Structures are given as structure tokens and as C-alpha cells.
Image: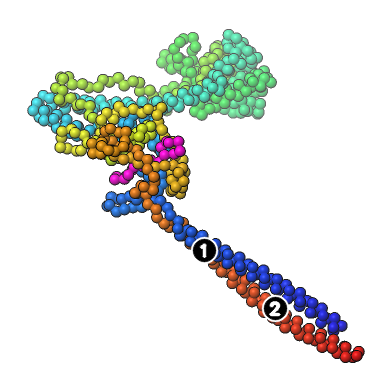
Amino acid sequence: MGMSASQARLLSITSRLTNNEFRAQTITNSKLRLATESEEASQKYMDALDSKKLVFLGYDDTGASTKVDLTPAVLYGYASMKNQYSLINAAGKILVSPQDAANFENTDTLEGFLRCYNLVEESAQEKADFEEKKAKQLAENEDYEAMYSAYETAHTAWKDEKTSWQIKYDAFAADWKIYQQELQAWEASNRGNLADRFSSYMGTADAPKQYCYVRALTGEMECYQHLLRAIIDYDTYNSSSSTYQTTTGQSVSVSGSMGAIGGQNLATRSMLKEVSDALNDVPAKLCDGDDDLSTPEKDNLLKAKADKGETITEADRLASDYKYNASTGEYDVKTLKEKAIDLYYLINKSLYTGMDTKALLINFTEGDLANISDRPKYEGSPDPGPFTKTEPKFTIELPDDLKEPEYSLIINDKEKGQWYTNLWYKMNGGSTAEVVQNVDNGSQGKVEFKIAGFTEITKNPAKANYDIIDPNLFTSSTWLQFALEHGVITLEKAMYNNPADNETRATNMTREGFVWTAMPYSNATDFIEVEDEVKIAKAEVIYKKEVTEIEYQDNKFDQDLKKLDTEHNALQTEYESIREAINKNTERSFKAFS
């Protein structure tokens, strides 16, 4: 037994030794891989140290140099003393910002385009010269001075009045536009006039249709009530009675069933509900204010009786389109719902003795209910009408030199004006641009600038040659650098040309101006390649993180190897001891049997 146990233990130790050797080999291989990863991390970091980016070299107001990442936005942003470049795509078109494109598309002339950048104004020098001349001549002639002063006062008042009218007209025009949109939407819905549809279902006095309406016209008061009940509040028509108050202060319980008013005709019932809903609208719809349809004029019979000193009965008040307002002493027009409740009370309490109930019904259904139309009504600002006041003129004709002239238009910033002039010509399909020159106005005042005839220089849409740059790329330095380095886009520079100064210059421009000239981006002196500090810093962080992780793994592997080595030595010692014991036992056994 002892021999067998020793041998089993020896086999177990041998297996563990073999396993430890395999694990040690695996860890050693892993350490070799870590060495490779450490090498790769170092190489990536070294590569990142060589990262370069393009920046644009500019100067601030103090003359100090500035460096900013080169993007299309930086390239196209105007600044004083800055070289002007354009980016050209593979189709030979200049890439421009969405704003520059919109300014070009929404104007027809160079002047209009420059106005988008607030570069055009009337000549301040010409204004000053005229005012000086006018003041001098007026000072020499008191009649002119008084006359001109009176004119200016009248003209200022006229301008103020016209401005006030314009504000009112603009408000009206805006509200009228909204009303027209609402009206078009209503007409497109094909709903038609609600009052007309009510008449088409109920009929008219001349051609009644629905049963209850027919019977009401012939004097059956129960049918009259059914009709009014449906109109007052259709949603509770078949429920228990509801209580309302008349304009005379009486309470009335309104009840009834659908009866013959449309019966099971869903279209009629739907129409009656629309009428009822219209009567309950807020703000409420009003009666037409006509108590007597026999005359073309609107009648208030209550006021007519009061003016004659005649007695006004409760029935008169209930049947009228008007209600007395005790707080103002005036008669107000009833709402359609108030009139329906008053008529219901009038019929329900049989107060109509001596009245023409048929006329009352027709007055309400064919007169008042015309106001339930859901056709939009214009309720906006009132139309001020056309401005008809004539602009004040001099009663005595002034000499020509006292009449205010039309001032020349000038460009108020020479450098910025030249920048956008160059851009306009390039977008308009040209490769040259007119030069912005000093205005020679013979005075010693403010220096002004213009282009000869620039107000008449028109756009040629057929030759327009530009594409809009993607807004996401407009501020991207990475894209611009890649596109320039790989030839996706090329560069052109606006260069001044004067044949008189440089007759050997190879250009198709025969006069002073600017020429868009292609050039390699590497030749642009204000494009500078610098270390990409952001990339380098990012690479350094990644490198340190990777090295830390590698070192941690390497230390862990060393610890694991140390543990395996310790265990291996212990197992090896035990192995040798057991094997020696086995050998001794074997020798003793042989001696015993020899």
C-alpha cells in the first residue's frame, strides 16, 4: 500500500510540474506579446509627434501676428490687410458660404450684392457740399430762407403722416393676408355656408321641407318648440329638461324629444348639431337686428314704441332682436341663443296672442340665423385706404443750385468693398474684377470710393459659377487640409494687376483691377504648417494609458511566474524525496527475495 500511494503521489506531482511548465510558457509568450504592444504604442506616439496642421497667419489691430486653424470660414472671413483666396472644386466652381450664395441669388446687380454687406451709401461729401452751398445762398436771401423753412416744416409733417399711415397699412396688410389664408382654407373644405345648409334641410317659408318646420309654419306651436329646443342645445335634446333664463328675467324649463325634426336622418341631425354649436360659440353670434322684415331698413320695434310713448309688453321684448340694458339706457342686440330661448318661452307660455307666429319664425330662421355662417369674417386691423395726401412742393421755384440733388452712391470701405467685389465677379463666372477707386469730387473732405458704373453692373445667371459649401465642412480644418493635400479642391488668389506698372504680366486683363490666379496651396505665404498640439496631446494621453496597462500586465505576469517558480521548486523537492524513498523500498524488496 505504501508503495502504491507513493507512486500515485509521484504521478500527481509529475502532472502538476508539467502543468506549471505549460503555464510558465504561456505567460512567457504573453510577456513577449506585451513587448510587441509596447513597441507599437511607442511607434504610434512617435508618429503623432510628427502630426502637422495648417494654420492661417494673420495680424490683429496692434500688428501682432495671429495663428488660427485654417478652415473655409477663416479663409473667407474678411479682415483688413488680408489676402483673399477662393476654393475651387473639381468642376471648376468656386465654393461659397450659404450666406454669400443667398446674397448673390437675391440681388441683380453688384450694387445690390454690396448692399447686403452694408457697403453702399449716399455720398456724405456731396451732401455736405450741397448743404454748405444751400446755407450760403439762403443766408444771402431771406425770402428763400423763410420759404425753405416753411417747406421743410410741411414736408416733415407730411413724411410723419405718411409713416403713420404706412404702419397702419402694414398692420392691415398682414391681418388681411391671414384672413385670405383662412378664407381659402374654408373654401377648400367645401363646407359651404352653414346658414344655407340649414335652409336646404329645413326648407324656407316658400318651400318648407322638414316635418316640424312645416307644422310650425302652419301654426302648430308644439312643433315650433321642438325646432327651437333642438337649436338651443342639441347635445341635451333627448335628456331631461334643462332650465334657461330669458332676457326678461324669466326661467323656463326646456324639454322635448327629437320627434319629427329629422327623425333618424343622420345628415339632418348632424346639421342641427352644427347650428346648435354655432349658437353656443364664444364669442356668441348675434341676431341681425331687424324686428320687421317687411321694410329694407333694420328695425328696433322696442325703441320705436318707446319713442312713441307706447306700452312695451313682455311679449314685445321676447319677440324682439333687442334687449334693454338698464345700466346704459340703451338697447343691445341679443345673441342668437338668447333669441331662441325668448321665443321658446313666448310659445311655451302662450304669450303670442295677437302676434303673427309664422312671421316670427321666418324672421328668426331666415333672418337672424343667417349669422350662424362659419365663413371666416375679417376682424383684423381696419383698412386705412390709400395715402392720398400730396407731397408738399415749393410755391416758388427755387434756383437749381438750391434743389437737393440725387447724390452719388459710394462704397464706404475700400478694402472690404474690393473683397466682396472680387467675390461677386468670381461667382458671376469671371476671373477678373473691377478695382475700387478713390472718388475725385474736388473737395478736401472725407475720402470716398466707388467703381465706375457699379450700380448698373448686372448679374448674368447663365454664367454664374459657384457651389455652396456644406455647412458642416465650412468650419472644418481637418477637411480643408485633406482636400488641399489630396487635390480635392484647388486654390486661387485675388491678385492686383496694373498693366502700366507691369506690362510683361501674362494676363488677359488690359486695365487696372484684380485677377483670380490659381496657385498651389503650399505657395500661400499665409498658410503655415505647425505641430498639431491637440493630436500630440491626445496621443500622449493614449500612450501613457497604454504603457500603464502594459506595465501592469507585465508586473502581474512576473508575479505569476514567481509563484509558479516557487511552487515548481517545492514540487521538485517533494518529487525527489518520494522517488528516493521508492528506490530504497525497491532495493530492500530485492534483497529480501535474493
Q: Is residue 573 visible?
A: yes
Left or right: 562 in relation to 475: right
Position of residue 584 measured from the top left corner of the image (x, y, whole percent): 82, 88
Q: Is residue 381 visible?
A: no
Chain part drawn in magenta: 78-94
Q: Which mark is residue 460?
A: none
Q: Amino acid at mark 1?
A: Ser
Return the residue at label 2. 568
Please say if 363 is above or below 58.
Answer: above
Q: Are marks 2 and 1 in contact (CB under 8 Å)?
A: no
Tell me the residue at 41%/27% (across/down): 462
Q: Amino acid at mark 2?
A: His
Queried whether the magenta region covers residue 247, the answer comes back as no
Q: Main secondary structure of the magenta part?
A: loop
The kind of secondary structure element at disc 2 is helix
What is the quadrant of the N terminus in the image?
bottom right
Position of residue 517 measured from the top left corner of the image (x, y, whole percent): 35, 39
Return the residue at label 1. 42
Tell me the residue at 37%/27% (across/down): 460
Please say if 39 is above or below 494.
Answer: below
Q: Residue furthest left?
A: 140
Position of residue 346 measured from the top left corner of the image (x, y, whole percent): 56, 19
Tell me the residue at 66%/76% (across/down): 563
Left or right: 400 in relation to 260: left
Left or right: 140 in relation to 310: left
In this rendering, the count of numbered labels is 2
In the picture, residue 588 is in which quadrant? bottom right
